[in-house]
């Protein structure tokens, strides 16, 4: 993987052109499927904004901490009755992108973000529909829509409802922005940059179309991936009560119950950090990674790959390879050195700890992909996963919906590896 995506990174840095970009976005706009002349600059710009709001002014860390506290209040309101997390996590995690894009959040009980997410998921599904495949071959196949029950028109309708929503925000921002002050959010930062480029609102790179498509992509790439990872983490921990016990012991010992957990606490929680790395090893959230296309001829290990070949990095081929990640029987280490049992499908955080209990970062675990088109939101996603889940386990013990019935680790078929709906009960710990 490293040989292809890092050593030869430049040759595989492009994305294939999507035929559907034309009717959906009026061209190659956005941050994900843009194979245009300006993707590098727009990627750099997006990373810069994320860094500014994440580190320069830690607005996003505060938003995540507030949302984590709000979710804890929501969990408390169930008084130990079973909870299903999809709606609340979608809204809380969607709120982080909402803050980034629009400079505000919505109430956790609002259905707005959930509705938004459902539209996004439905739109994405069209790409896996037979008519979607046909349209990618030749766009005029879209005229066969009536034969397919109107799915193309329905997708377009949902898509443009979201586009209208974003354009409305862009309009409001343009009316209220203070060009002399600090940007409130992504839209402000973009409009300021647009102005610096002599108000090139009509040129592709700094156009409103690019801004709208970029925000759209931040939601579609950053919301379902992160909320599903968080749900999957809760599932693994409920399925492994011994792991949960150790998490509680570590949080109680290092942080206690009375203060909010911040990113600065991560180094104090090596066991918990190992659990998160194990989550990312075992559950690569995209069942099929995003495509790249070779922009030069390549030769890998004697195989020649011509320019224009689609390639897809599939990280589970490393993450769940028995030879790479054997089960580590921790309790036997002291006695017998290390004993291997080839079962990389076990959730086992001890793989990521040394004999002194220190966390060991593993470069073979790459849930955010590697190279020039690796996930743009990696630091934000890592911050969300840590702060949300550590705060939940600081306050609650999660147990199966029915005593003794461990929730299943089955997944829904789809582009995102999402656990089948499960419920758990939460016991307040303090
Ligand atoms: C657990 C959460 C997440 C996971 C597992 C994840 C994973 C990925 C992966 C595997 C890719 C494909 C990279 C490739 O082509 O090789 C990707 C791309 C991308 N991700 Fe994420 N992601 C997550 C969260 C986020 C967040 C929070 C954001 C932004 C707010 C985000 C924004 C993006 C964007 C814009 C791209 C396209 C980058 C490009 O083409 O240059 N992601 N992500």
Image (cartoon, rainbow, N blue to C red):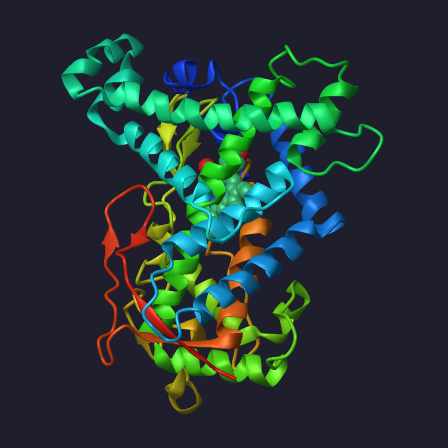
At 17% from the left edge and 20% from the top edge, which residue is drawn? 148
Rendered-image quadrant of the N terminus:
top left
Establish if 264 lies above or below 356: above
At 70% from the left edge and 13% from the top edge, which residue is drawn? 200
| Quadrant in the rendering for residue 84 | bottom left
Q: Position of residue 45 (x, y in %)?
A: 67, 32
Q: Position of residue 407 (x, y in %)?
A: 25, 68
At 56% from the left edge and 43% from the top edge, which residue is drawn? 97
Count of numbered labels shown in the rendering: 0
| Quadrant in the rendering for residue 403 | bottom left
Q: Position of residue 76 (x, y in %)?
A: 46, 71
**Side of 396 relative to 341 (left or right):** right
Pick out the residue farthest to the bottom. Answer: 335
Q: Is residue 206 visible?
A: yes
Q: Is residue 374 visible?
A: no
**Depth check: 317 or 162 in front?**
162
Q: Position of residue 142 (x, y in %)?
A: 26, 13
**Depth check: 164 or 310 in front?**
164
Pick out the residue farthest to the left. Answer: 147
Establish if 379 lies above or below 345: above
Establish if 273 lies above or below 31: below
| Quadrant in the rendering for residue 320 | bottom left
**Side of 57 relative to 275 (left or right):** right
At 27% from the left edge and 72% from the top edge, which residue is drawn? 401
């Amino acid at each position: 993987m490293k040989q292809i995506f890092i050593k030869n990174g430049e040759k595989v840095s492009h994305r294939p052109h999507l035929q559907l970009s034309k009717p959906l976005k009026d061209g190659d706009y956005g941050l994900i499927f843009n194979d245009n002349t300006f993707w590098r600059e727009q990627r750099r710009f997006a990373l810069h904004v994320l860094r500014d709001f994440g580190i320069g002014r830690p607005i996003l860390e505060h938003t995540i901490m507030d949302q984590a506290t709000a979710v804890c209040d929501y969990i408390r309101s169930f008084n130990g009755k079973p909870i299903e997390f999809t709606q609340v996590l979608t809204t809380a995690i969607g709120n982080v992108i909402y803050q980034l894009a629009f400079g505000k959040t919505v109430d956790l009980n609002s259905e707005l973000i959930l509705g938004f997410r459902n539209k996004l998921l439905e739109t994405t599904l069209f790409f896996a529909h037979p008519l979607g495949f046909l349209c990618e071959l030749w766009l005029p196949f879209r005229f066969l829509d009536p034969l397919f029950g109107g799915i193309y028109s329905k997708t377009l309708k949902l898509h443009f409802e979201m586009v209208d929503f974003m354009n409305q925000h862009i309009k409001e921002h343009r009316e209220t922005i203070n060009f002399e002050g600090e940007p409130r959010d992504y839209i402000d930062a973009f409009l300021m940059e647009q102005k610096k480029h002599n108000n090139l609102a009509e040129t592709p790179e700094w156009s409103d179309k690019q801004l709208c498509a970029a925000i759209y992509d931040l939601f579609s790439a950053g919301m379902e991936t992160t909320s599903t990872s968080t749900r999957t983490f809760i599932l693994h921990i409920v399925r492994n009560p011994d792991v949960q016990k150790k998490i509680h012991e570590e949080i109680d010992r290092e942080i206690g119950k009375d203060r909010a957990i911040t990113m600065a606490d991560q180094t104090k929680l090596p066991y918990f950090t190992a659990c998160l790395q194990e989550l990312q090893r075992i559950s690569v959230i995209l069942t099929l990674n995003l495509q790249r296309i070779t922009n030069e001829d390549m030769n890998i290990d004697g195989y020649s790959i011509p320019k224009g070949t689609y390639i897809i990095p599939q990280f589970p081929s490393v993450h769940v390879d028995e030879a790479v990640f054997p089960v580590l029987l921790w309790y036997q280490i002291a006695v017998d050195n290390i004993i291997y049992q080839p079962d990389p499908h076990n959730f086992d955080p001890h793989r990521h700890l040394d004999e002194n209990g220190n966390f060991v970062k593993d470069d073979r675990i790459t849930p955010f992909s590697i190279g020039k088109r690796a996930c743009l939101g990696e630091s934000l996603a890592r911050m969300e996963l840590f702060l949300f889940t550590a705060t939940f386990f600081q306050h609650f013990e999660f147990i199966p919906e029915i005593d003794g019935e461990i929730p299943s680790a089955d997944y829904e078929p789809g582009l995102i590896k999402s656990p089948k709906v499960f419920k758990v009960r939460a016991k307040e710990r303090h």
